[in-house]
């Protein structure tokens, strides 16, 4: 396997990423294998350290490698792990027919994004020759942080200044910066037990992790601990944390000195209700680390996220900031800054909401028409999801496996994730993003036949 650095079709960091990903997926790099250090890899390939670091961070974000403090990067057991298999519709990726209708993907609909408009902004940023001759600011470009600060104040009620914002390539890269700053807090509790990517990072930094439900049953989270939650999407179904619960959590956090990490994933995609105020805003900006991402709002391939630090952590970050390189593309930061300033982010959100609302409603209607009384569809509160309760003796996992054998990808929902009334019917989640509405009827008919045929 050869690393071709002269391929004009990909950015350099993507070529390095694909090279190591292929080695890992093919088994040529076994779990536990240590990758070359960033410095050594950069010297061997004659690339900048930033390029190699970006590739490594992308591999870590997708779970192929993990970082061990003071040691390096190591290949994980992602291809052999149980949690990864749970997200697949069934078996190994090479088994069974090719997936033709992917209702389990986290991709986005092509029509939700204005590619021509984004290209103009990218071209405009590439014309800033002098500015692109230097590395990006470790904290993120100042103008972008100003634009993010203004946007968050208007739409999410976040209390901050540009100095409190740190930009990075994905939430995981930001957690790698945050964890060393809060080492004195030994325990981290997660409301969503399925967020293994984030939980693993805390474990890598030797935090004791656990679920918030278990902590509540044992008397509540310990004083001085960390609480990680996604209040705008508490479950995969999209349940939202009620304002009363938010205020109770903030009161408990204040009394017990608990640091809250608010991952505001999917907050903009509230189709049927106005967004609930952010925890960070309700807390006046103190005691809460706020995380957000543009990957869902724009494109998954635009790896750009941000972190708003509370005032008490800002001095700690400033002491360490010169040790970190910026992992997000400077070109994309410049482009996104002007994109936001010109009002296109708001129009992009409105466009995506309208598209996905229509697609989700159409998917519900088609499920009801094709399945009849054998399925009950529910519109999701957030995101691109439709929850379907199937009246069958099969389990949700068995439904997903049968669907996969028919070339249809759906996601099984375990009982803890669904929490819709007292029904014991198996449930599956279907994303309306990737499959076009013109294919719904054929795909759902084949899904029906795979379950009841």
Image (spheres, rainbow, N blue to C red):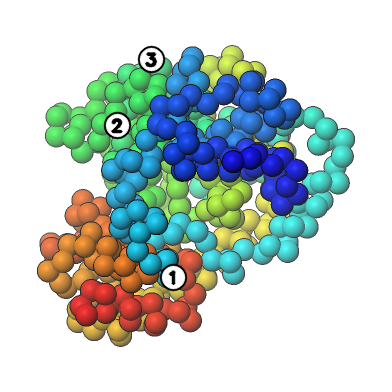
Label 2 element class: strand
Q: Nearer the viewer, residue 24 or 248?
A: 24
Q: Earlier in the sequence, mark 3 or mark 2?
A: 3
Q: Quadrant of the C terminus?
A: bottom left
Q: Earlier in the sequence, mark 1 or mark 3?
A: 1
The image position of residue 164, as x and y in percent, is 58, 29
Q: Gap in Å between the C-alphas at discs 1 and 3? A: 49 Å
Residue at x-position 15% and y-position 29%: 219
Image mark for residue 184? 3
Q: Quadrant of the N terminus?
A: top right
Image mark for residue 154? none
Q: Local crowd at mark 3 within 10 Å, few (<14), some, or many (≥20)? A: few
Residue at x-position 63% and y-position 56%: 345
Q: Are marks 1 and 2 in contact (CB under 8 Å)?
A: no
The answer to which quarter of the image holds residue 272 is bottom left
Q: Nearer the viewer, residue 354 or 332?
A: 332
Residue 380 visible: no
Q: For this view, does 261 lie left or right of residue 49? A: left
Label 1 element class: loop
Residue at x-position 39% and y-position 24%: 204
* Pointer 1 residue: 100
Residue at x-position 47% and y-position 43%: 26
Residue 436 in the image: above or below residue 316: below
The image position of residue 41, as x and y in percent, is 63, 25
Q: For this view, does 163 lie left or right of residue 265? A: right
* Pointer 2 residue: 189
Q: Gap in Å between the C-alphas at discs 3 and 2? A: 15 Å
Label 3 element class: loop
Q: For this view, does 36 lie left or right of residue 443? A: right
The image position of residue 375, as x and y in percent, is 23, 75
The image position of residue 255, as x and y in percent, is 29, 24
Q: Are marks 3 and 2 in contact (CB under 8 Å)?
A: no
């Amino acid at each position: 396997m050869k690393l071709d650095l002269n391929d004009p079709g990909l950015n350099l960091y993507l070529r390095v990423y694909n090279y190591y990903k292929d080695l890992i997926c093919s088994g040529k790099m076994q779990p536990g294998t240590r990758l070359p250090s960033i410095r050594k890899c950069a010297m061997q390939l004659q690339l900048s350290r930033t390029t190699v670091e970006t590739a490594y961070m992308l591999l870590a974000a997708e779970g192929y490698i993990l970082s061990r403090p003071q040691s390096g990067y190591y290949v994980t057991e992602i291809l052999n792990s149980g949690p990864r298999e749970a997200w697949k519709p069934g078996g190994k990726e090479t088994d069974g027919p090719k997936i033709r209708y992917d209702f389990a993907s986290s991709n986005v609909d092509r029509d939700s994004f204005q590619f021509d408009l984004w290209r103009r902004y990218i071209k405009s940023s590439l014309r800033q020759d002098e500015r692109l001759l230097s590395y990006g600011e470790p904290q993120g470009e100042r103008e972008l942080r100003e634009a993010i600060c203004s946007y968050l104040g208007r739409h999410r009620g976040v209390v901050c200044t540009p100095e409190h914002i740190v930009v990075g390539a994905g939430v995981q890269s930001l957690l790698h910066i945050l964890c060393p700053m809060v080492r004195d807090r030994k325990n981290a509790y997660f409301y969503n037990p399925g967020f293994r990517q984030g939980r693993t990072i805390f474990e890598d930094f030797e935090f004791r992790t656990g679920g918030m439900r278990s902590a509540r049953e044992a008397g509540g989270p310990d004083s001085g601990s960390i609480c990680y939650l996604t209040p705008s999407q508490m479950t995969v179904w999209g349940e939202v944390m009620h304002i009363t619960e938010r205020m109770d959590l903030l009161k408990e956090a204040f009394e017990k000195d608990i640091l809250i990490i608010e991952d505001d994933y999917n907050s903009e995609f509230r189709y049927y209700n106005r967004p609930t105020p952010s925890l960070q805003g309700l807390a006046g900006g103190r005691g809460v680390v706020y995380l957000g991402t543009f990957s869902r709002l724009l494109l998954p391939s635009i790896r750009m996220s941000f972190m708003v630090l509370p005032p008490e952590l800002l001095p700690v970050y400033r002491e360490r900031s010169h040790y970190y390189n910026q992992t997000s593309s400077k070109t994309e930061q410049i482009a996104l800054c002007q994109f936001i300033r010109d009002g296109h982010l708001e129009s992009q959100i409105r466009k995506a909401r309208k598209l996905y609302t229509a697609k989700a409603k159409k998917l519900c209607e088609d499920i009801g028409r094709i399945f009849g009384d054998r399925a009950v569809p529910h519109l999701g509160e957030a995101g691109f999801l439709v929850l379907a309760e199937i009246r069958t003796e099969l389990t949700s996992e068995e439904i997903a496996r049968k669907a996969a054998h028919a070339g249809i990808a759906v996601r099984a929902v375990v009982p803890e994730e669904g929490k819709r009334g007292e029904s014991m019917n198996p449930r599956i989640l279907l994303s309306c993003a990737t499959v076009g509405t013109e294919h719904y009827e054929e795909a759902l008919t084949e899904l029906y036949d795979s379950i009841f045929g």
